[in-house]
Image (cartoon, rainbow, N blue to C red):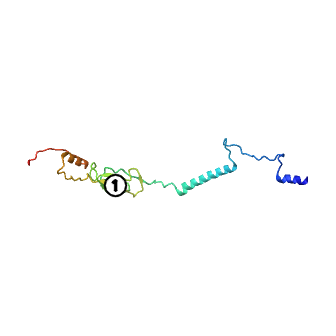
Amino acid sequence: MLGDSLKRRRSGPSSSEPGPPRDRKLPKLLGPFSLTRWGMLAAIIGVVSFGVGYLLSTLVLFPRPETAGAGVPVPELYDQTLSDAEATLRELGLELGDVRELTSATTDSGRVLAQDPVPGQQLLPGASVAVGVSAGAPELRVPPLAGLGQATARDLLETLGFDVAVQQTRSAAF
């Protein structure tokens, strides 16, 4: 009766009466995968967040370093004398920095063996270039060899970097 119709309206449609469709789906945009509205919103928020983070990191946190438009290329100083190297640097507006002596058996004394920074790098005017200058061949002392056999003495001297030549002579004492 009257109470039955009110009960039916409050509890929803009965199983015999068709109600509104409950399965409303968005069109399938990605083949077997379908995105819901929340999924699309999350994807948009993710892309926007990534873009904002990228811009923040590249422009604010880690900006591009200033270009060295007024930079001076470092010249090659190898095999120059120390005074020539200093003059070359002065002509370019650079200064001679630390000078260290290095031993070298192949380079004449007073010649540049090494430099820092290497040739071609850009420096601001007034910056210094450190060099390593040859002090000549290292002085080696001959160790005491008395009492050693010829083969042992030769091996010891060759190990220390000496060139060994054997010359046999007769002693007047024997």
Element carrying mark 1: strand
Query: Does residue 163 appear to the left or right of 131 in the view shown?
Result: left
Query: Does residue 11 appear to the left or right of 74 in the view shown?
Result: right
Q: Which residue is mark 1?
A: 131
How far across and how far down the image is residue 166, in percent? 18, 44
Residue at left 55%, top 55%?
Answer: 57
- Of 12 and 142, nearer the camera is 12
Residue 30: quadrant of the picture: top right
Residue at left 34%, top 58%?
Answer: 98
Categorize mark 1 by other alpha carbons within 10 Å: few (<14), some (14-19), many (20+).
Answer: many
How far across and how far down the image is residue 102, in percent? 30, 54
- Of 39 and 104, nearer the camera is 39
- Of 10 and 54, nearer the camera is 10
- Looking at the picture, which amino acid does disc 1 mark? Val
Query: Does residue 62 appear to the left or right of 32 in the view shown?
Result: left
Query: Does residue 139 appear to the left or right of 1 in the view shown?
Result: left
Furthest toward the right, the residue is 1
How far across and how far down the image is residue 47, in percent? 62, 51
Number of numbered labels in the structure image: 1
Furthest toward the top, the residue is 31
How far across and how far down the image is residue 54, in percent? 57, 53
